[in-house]
Image: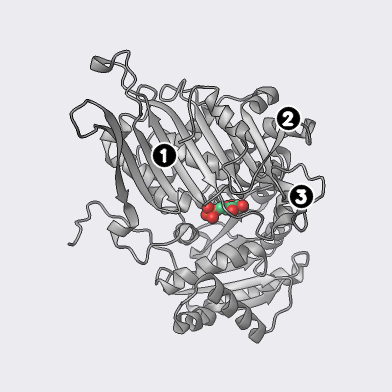
């Protein structure tokens, strides 16, 4: 049966050049290159499009092709060989020396040459898949050599994409941001958080906006509390160096806050960038600031057993691999409704999920009676992409007993979309189209650090103390995480 689609809108990427700095690094290999390949393979890339990879490693053309072919075979097993050949045809490589003006001159010359070959007019997306400490060097180099032209200059544009954690503290992150703004306007800076590009996350707002039946109940009159779970089966995946300097909270907080905002912000008057950002900002501004003692009292952090024996991890590491916490949003919609979050590495099967737990009925025939179960609306983001609503029904039989029954919408299967973009693919399309809606503003980046800072300060004051619990890999964290929610008379769903 063909589904009838109502309102339908498509973002079309503009023809452009994609320049990837840090092209031989971990982020490029795990996320960006597979996304670029995916866009080309699915026919979602712009018609005129090429990719210039830049990294410090010297690579000959055959070496580059061998590396990319191996990477594609790993990241997209079963991809047709013609897709790989087509992709390789769009890729070029330039050895980078980020410190030297000569490199940026050579980059400019190569871009002009490739623009002419591919019929593109100075439309350039620069992806900085390099450590935040090196952002400034690269943006200064691009700025000085005229490669960060303002949008509209000579009909072209230049955009920068950067990736969290944008620094390691509020001060560092603000310094990194100020460095970027020295060379580029805010309208040219795309701060990526790939969770905003996930299909189900996109659907949270679409569903709320299109179905008043839900959004009307998305408030403290009906909702008892909200839960966000981001569990991963994997541990470090060879990223010990990075993780030892970050810890789970710095690594994942941006994702968690984006999930919370998209679920709970007031609906914008349109999905246009400015309306959307204004409402998101209002939501973040409604989260009260906390002292470090108060923040730490509402949080549990833990490390999985065996973490300190992992290669590259310090024998006395005080880094957390698990975090659970509670926070409140002080606005008319959510006042009094706790948001509970838990996220961890090696916490059983991968599971990313947002659940809105409704209040049980407290009126009519159920006044003073506990029917046993609440309604729960759940957005499953990983591994399944679906939504479910658990309703309470009468158990069939002679007695009046209640049971929860789940209505489930298996979302991508229904849509029959084989070529749906992945999270990174979607965000790259948006950046190529010049739409910043799904990217983080400078304010959001600062808020992230303001939110994290009291927690980090509390932990720094007591790095190895009782505040760092431990848990067995494969479980859903330490018992203290269960106690955090149970002390409020609730339980993780
Ligand atoms: C990244 C974190 O941003 O998100 C990783 O740095 C984490 O540590 C990953 O594993 C999770 O993303 P996804 O899309 O696999 O759920």
Q: Nearer the viewer, residue 320 or 245?
A: 320
Q: Nearer the viewer, residue 217 or 304?
A: 304
x then y, percent, for residue 174: 68, 41
Q: Say which residue label 1 marks.
A: 275
Q: Residues within 10 Å of mark 3 (few under 14, many from 20)?
A: some
The residue closer to the viewer here, 64 or 80, is 80
Find numbered disc 3 in the image and state the secondary structure of the residue it sits on. Answer: helix
Residue 312 falls in which quadrant of the image?
bottom right
* Secondary structure beneath label 2: helix
Q: How many marks?
A: 3
**Position of 216 compared to 175: left or right?**
left
| Secondary structure of the residue carrying numbered label 1 | helix
Measured as percent of width and height from the top left, residue 45 is found at 44, 69
Q: Which mark is residue 308?
A: 3
Which residue is farthest front? 398
- Within 10 Å of disc 2 (Cα), the crowding (few <14, some 14-19, many 20+) is some
User: In the rendered image, which quarter is residue 256 located in?
Assistant: top right
| Image position, residue 142 (x, y; %) | 67, 62
Q: CA distance from mark 3 to mark 2?
A: 22 Å
Residue under the image location 70 percent in, 46 percent down? 305
Of the image marks 3 and 2, the number of the one nearer the N terminus: 3
CA distance for labels 1 and 2: 36 Å
The residue labelled by disc 2 is 458
Q: Is residue 390 visible?
A: yes
Q: Quadrant of the N terminus?
A: bottom left
């Amino acid at each position: 049966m063909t589904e009838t689609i109502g309102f339908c809108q498509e973002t079309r990427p503009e023809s452009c050049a994609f320049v990837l700095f840090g092209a031989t690094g971990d982020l490029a290999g795990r996320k960006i290159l597979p996304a670029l390949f995916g866009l080309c393979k699915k026919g979602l890339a712009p018609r005129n499009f090429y990719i210039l990879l830049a990294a410090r490693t010297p690579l000959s053309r055959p070496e580059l092709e061998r590396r990319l072919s191996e990477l594609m075979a790993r990241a997209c097993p079963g991809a047709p060989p013609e897709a790989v050949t087509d992709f390789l045809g769009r890729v070029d490589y330039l050895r980078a020396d980020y410190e030297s003006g000569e490199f940026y001159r050579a980059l400019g010359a190569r871009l002009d040459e490739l623009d002419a070959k591919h019929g593109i007019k100075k439309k350039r997306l620069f992806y900085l898949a390099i450590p935040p400490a090196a952002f400034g060097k690269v943006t200064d180099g691009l700025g000085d050599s005229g490669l960060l032209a303002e949008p509209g200059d000579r009909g072209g544009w230049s955009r920068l994409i950067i990736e969290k954690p944008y620094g390691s503290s509020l001060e560092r992150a603000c310094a990194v941001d100020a460095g970027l703004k020295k060379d580029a306007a805010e309208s040219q800076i795309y701060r990526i958080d790939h969770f905003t590009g996930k299909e189900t996350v996109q659907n949270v707002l679409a569903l709320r906006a299109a179905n008043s039946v839900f959004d009307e109940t998305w408030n403290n009159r009906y909702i008892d509390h909200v839960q966000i779970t981001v569990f991963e089966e994997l541990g470090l995946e060879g990223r010990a160096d990075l993780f030892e300097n970050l810890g789970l909270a710095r690594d994942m907080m941006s994702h968690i806050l984006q999930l919370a905002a998209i679920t709970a912000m007031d609906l914008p008057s349109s999905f246009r960038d400015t309306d959307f950002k204004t409402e998101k900002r209002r939501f973040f501004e409604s989260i009260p600031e906390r002292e470090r003692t108060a923040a730490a009292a509402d949080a549990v952090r833990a490390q999985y057993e065996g973490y300190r024996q992992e290669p590259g991890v310090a024998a006395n590491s005080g880094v957390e691999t698990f975090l659970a916490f509670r926070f409140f949003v002080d606005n008319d919609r959510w006042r009094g409704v706790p948001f509970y979050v838990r996220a961890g590495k090696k916490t059983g099967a991968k599971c990313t999920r947002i659940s809105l737990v409704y209040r049980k009925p407290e009126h009519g025939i159920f006044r003073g009676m506990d029917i046993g179960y609440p309604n729960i609306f759940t957005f499953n983001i990983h591994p399944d992409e679906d939504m479910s609503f658990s309703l309470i029904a009468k158990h069939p039989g002679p007695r009046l007993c209640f049971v929860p029954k789940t209505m489930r919408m298996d979302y991508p299967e229904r849509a029959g979309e084989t070529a749906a973009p992945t999270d990174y693919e979607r965000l790259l399309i948006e950046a190529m189209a010049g739409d910043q809606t799904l990217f983080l503003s400078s304010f959001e980046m600062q808020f992230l650090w303001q939110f994290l800072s009291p927690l980090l300060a509390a932990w720094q004051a007591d790095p190895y103390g009782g505040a760092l619990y431990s848990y067995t890999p494969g479980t859903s964290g330490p018992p203290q995480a269960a106690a955090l929610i149970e002390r409020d008379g609730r339980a993780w769903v």
